């Protein structure tokens, strides 16, 4: 399949597809980070994660409409408010869900899977009733439009760069919250030994709720970023949920570095193959490879050595 | 009668007789052929639900990919029927007569090699059993031998369901794409679209379901069935006792896969088409809810649960399409939080003591009402904790 192209063309193709892969990588990382926190740290399967993401997207959409209508002067920077609001909204809903649903099911992980699937159906239908079944898009401020020409064939869209920078900042932020803050220390303590953590005075229930809310909040930011590169529909979240779960499992459930590495591998593989094969076959091959590797190495790429 | 008593208590015998009566007498009398055919379609999902009771309820393995096996069975059957419908005479207007119409639309000029064997009915019937069993064996052996279970298994089976759907939709020329394999007409030149054929297929389907229930009952009452429950509750102790846990799990997963495939094949026969919308993530997880609503521990409950949920789905989505997804979502949550043992759990706690009293006074007159409750019965073990 490479024979029809010259070397320079191949180089450009790989660069271009590599860049498209980087945007996919950013979306995957943002979604998977929240999931890795919830699944890796708490062992809860949140099938409604995609819907938390879509909540963030809809909050951004509402924000963009509101600012455009009432404060046109601020339109250039509305995105930052929107992101904060998306984080708060998704996080608050996450805390509510944890309180009403998840906390009863910590001992039954398979049942959380079913319950959160039910939640995702309810949320999807709620979005459909409120925002309509059609996809909506936000209007971007001018400074995010256009692209930077790198060579005469390769152009890099600015919104793509912005999403990547955002991903980088969020990933660093999550690292600091989990590994350099008091809350993160408590979270990790609860993960490693719940009973001992409780014995030294950590309020484990509160830690659970905060962790879940944090994961959902990051999903909200992911949704916010998602609006920059695509449109949002009620069922858009479900399209990504399987990929994201595979990413988290492939990376090694409890390892953030593993999550990032596997997002990178999967997004690049998929994006590069998409150019040479059809989109569906690229996805089939990527997912099959991941499932195959997981069957040979079930603990994922990076695994923590904890006795459970 | 001793042979029956060895694998079935009186309550279970009554349970299966009631199901047989409902399937063979009450429903055909109460419904016209259109509704009956619809319920026949629902009953094909019951095969999957019974498989899930064994696999998930009894052994604790949640597979979110049962649609894969349902689809494999259904597609095998559909391929045979499609080839029979695509005779050179019937497809004379195509540029290549004698191949299925969707292949012709996709500029395929010869029958692909994997379609060839499906000209034979014997091969097709064997394939319906063997293909899903082999596929399940490969997945099961790869996962269970490495002691992967629980949520990881659920996620990977779900991914497999997603992969197969994308593959079927993507390879339109070989599989019929998103529309699936449609326009199926005859089975050995017997028209399956007439009302008479629909009645016959409904009864065949019902008989197969009863046979599957009996077979599952035999498995459950055997030593293997007790081991299944033991694996669910204390996997390590089973392993320490010298059993190979992975083989037990592989067996039950393959068994559930074959049941699903039989359901899929009967689905194709009764509905007249097969499409990827019965393979993917959403249908697979809905099949789990059929099982959960019926009660994940009772094979009889699974049949009722399937009928109940599907009946509700048809009724509500006809009248209040908006509300149905809310209802289904709430059902998922309620069945997990409020009644984890489903309909059979409710039956077991409220109705079973009454039924039992009636049955035992009829059989043994003079015994007091305070006879000890039966140790096993319709959805026994409802007091056991839900599988993790």
Image (cartoon, coloured by chain):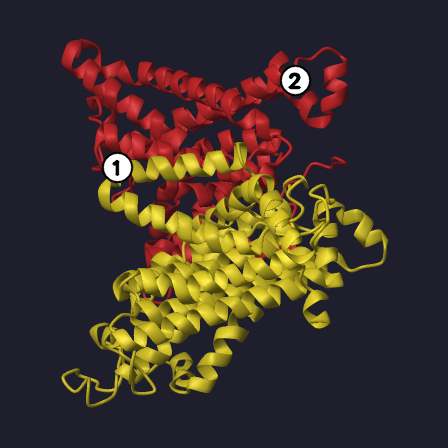
Chain colours: A red, B yellow
As rendered, which of A86 and A108 lies closer to the eye? A108
Q: Circle 1 marks a residue in which chain?
A: B
Asked whether the viewer can see residue A157, the reply is no
Tag 2 secondary structure = helix
Left or right of B285? Residue B91 is left
Give coordinates of residue B378: x percent, y percent.
Answer: 61, 51
Packing grade of label 1 (10 A; few <14, some 14-19, many >=20) is: some
Give coordinates of residue B156: x percent, y percent.
Answer: 54, 51
Q: Circle 2 marks a residue in which chain?
A: A
Give coordinates of residue B309: x percent, y percent.
Answer: 40, 47
Which residue is identified by label 2? A204
In the picture, the disc for residue B322 is: 1
Residue depicted at x 38% and y 15%:
A84
Instruction: Find the residue positioned furthest to the front.
Output: B366
Residue depicted at x 55% and y 17%:
A210
As rendered, which of B171 and B240 lies closer to the eye? B240
Residue A192, compared with residue A300, is above or below; it is: above
- Quadrant (top left/top right/bottom left/bottom right) for the N terminus of chain B: bottom right
Residue depicted at x 55% and y 52%:
B63
As rendered, which of A288 and A108 lies closer to the eye? A108
Residue depicted at x 69% and y 64%:
B7
Asked whether the viewer can see residue A18, the reply is yes
Label 1 or label 2, whichever lies nearer to me, is 1
Tag 1 secondary structure = helix
- Count of marks overlaid on the render: 2
In the picture, the disc for residue B163 is: none
Quarter of the image for residue B228 reads bottom right
Give coordinates of residue B330: x percent, y percent.
Answer: 41, 34
Residue B183, compared with residue B66, is above or below; it is: below
């Amino acid at each position: 399949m490479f024979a029809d192209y010259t070397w320079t063309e191949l180089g450009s193709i790989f660069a271009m597809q590599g860049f498209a892969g980087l945007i996919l990588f950013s979306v995957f990382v943002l979604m998977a980070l929240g999931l890795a926190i919830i699944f890796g740290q708490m062992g809860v399967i949140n099938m409604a994660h995609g819907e938390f993401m879509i909540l963030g997207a809809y909050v951004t959409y509402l924000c963009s409409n509101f600012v455009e209508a009432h404060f046109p002067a601020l339109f250039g920077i509305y995105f930052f408010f929107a992101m904060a609001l998306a984080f708060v909204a998704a996080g608050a809903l996450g805390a509510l869900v944890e309180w009403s649903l998840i906390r009863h099911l910590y001992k039954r992980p398979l049942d959380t899977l079913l319950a959160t699937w039910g939640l995702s159906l309810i949320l999807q239908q709620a979005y459909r009733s409120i925002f309509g079944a059609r996809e909506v898009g936000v209007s971007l401020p001018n400074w995010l439009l256009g692209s930077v020409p790198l060579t005469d064939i390769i152009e890099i869209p600015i919104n793509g760069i912005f999403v990547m920078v955002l991903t980088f900042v969020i990933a660093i932020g999550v690292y600091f919250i989990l590994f350099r803050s008091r809350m993160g220390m408590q979270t990790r303590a609860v993960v490693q030994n719940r009973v001992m953590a409780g014995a030294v005075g950590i309020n484990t229930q509160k830690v659970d709720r905060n962790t879940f809310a944090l994961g959902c909040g990051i999903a909200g930011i992911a949704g916010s970023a998602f609006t920059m590169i695509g449109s949002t529909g009620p069922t858009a979240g479900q399209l990504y949920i399987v990929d994201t779960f595979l990413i988290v499992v492939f990376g090694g459930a409890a390892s953030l570095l593993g999550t990032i590495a596997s997002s990178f591998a999967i997004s690049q593989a998929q994006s590069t193959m998409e150019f040479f094969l059809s989109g569906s076959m690229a996805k089939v091959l990527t997912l099959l490879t991941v499932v195959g590797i997981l069957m040979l190495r079930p603990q994922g790429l990076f695994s923590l050595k904890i006795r459970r | 009668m001793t042979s029956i008593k060895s694998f079935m208590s009186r309550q279970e015998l009554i349970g299966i007789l009631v199901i047989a009566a409902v399937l063979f007498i009450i429903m055909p009398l109460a419904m016209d052929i259109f509704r009956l055919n619809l319920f026949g379609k629902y009953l094909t999902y019951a095969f999957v639900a019974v498989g899930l009771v064994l696999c998930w309820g009894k052994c604790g393995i949640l597979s979110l990919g049962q649609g894969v096996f349902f689809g494999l069975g259904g597609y095998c059957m559909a391929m045979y029927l499609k080839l029979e419908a695509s005779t050179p005479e019937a497809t004379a207007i195509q540029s290549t007569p004698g191949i299925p119409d969707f292949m012709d639309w996709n500029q395929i000029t010869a029958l692909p090699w994997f379609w060839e064997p499906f000209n034979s009915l014997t091969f097709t019937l064997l394939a319906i059993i063997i293909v899903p069993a082999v596929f399940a064996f490969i997945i099961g052996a790869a996962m269970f031998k490495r002691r992967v279970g629980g949520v990881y298994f659920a996620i990977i089976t779900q991914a497999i369901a997603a992969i197969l759907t994308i593959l079927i939709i993507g390879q339109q020329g070989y599989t019929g794409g998103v529309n699936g394999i449609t326009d199926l007409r005859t089975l050995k030149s017997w028209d399956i679209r007439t009302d008479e054929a629909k009645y016959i297929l409904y009864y065949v389907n019902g008989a197969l379901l009863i046979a599957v229930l009996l077979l599952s009952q035999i498995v459950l009452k055997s030593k293997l069935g007790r081991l299944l429950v033991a694996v669910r509750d204390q996997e390590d102790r089973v392993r320490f006792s010298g059993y190979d846990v992975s083989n037990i799990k592989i067996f039950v997963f393959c068994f559930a896969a074959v049941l699903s495939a039989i359901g899929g094949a009967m689905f194709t026969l009764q509905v007249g088409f097969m499409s990827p919308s019965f393979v993917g993530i959403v249908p697979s997880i809905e099949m789990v809810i059929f099982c959960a609503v019926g009660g994940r521990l009772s094979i009889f409950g699974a049949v009722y649960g399937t009928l109940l949920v599907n009946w509700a789905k048809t009724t509500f989505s006809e009248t209040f399409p908006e509300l149905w997804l809310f209802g289904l979502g709430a059902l998922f949550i309620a069945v997990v939080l409020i009644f984890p043992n489903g309909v059979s759990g409710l039956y077991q706690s409220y109705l079973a003591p009454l039924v039992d009293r009636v049955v035992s006074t009829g059989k043994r007159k003079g015994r007091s009402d305070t006879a000890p409750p039966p140790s096993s019965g319709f959805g026994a073990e409802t007091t056991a904790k839900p599988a993790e």
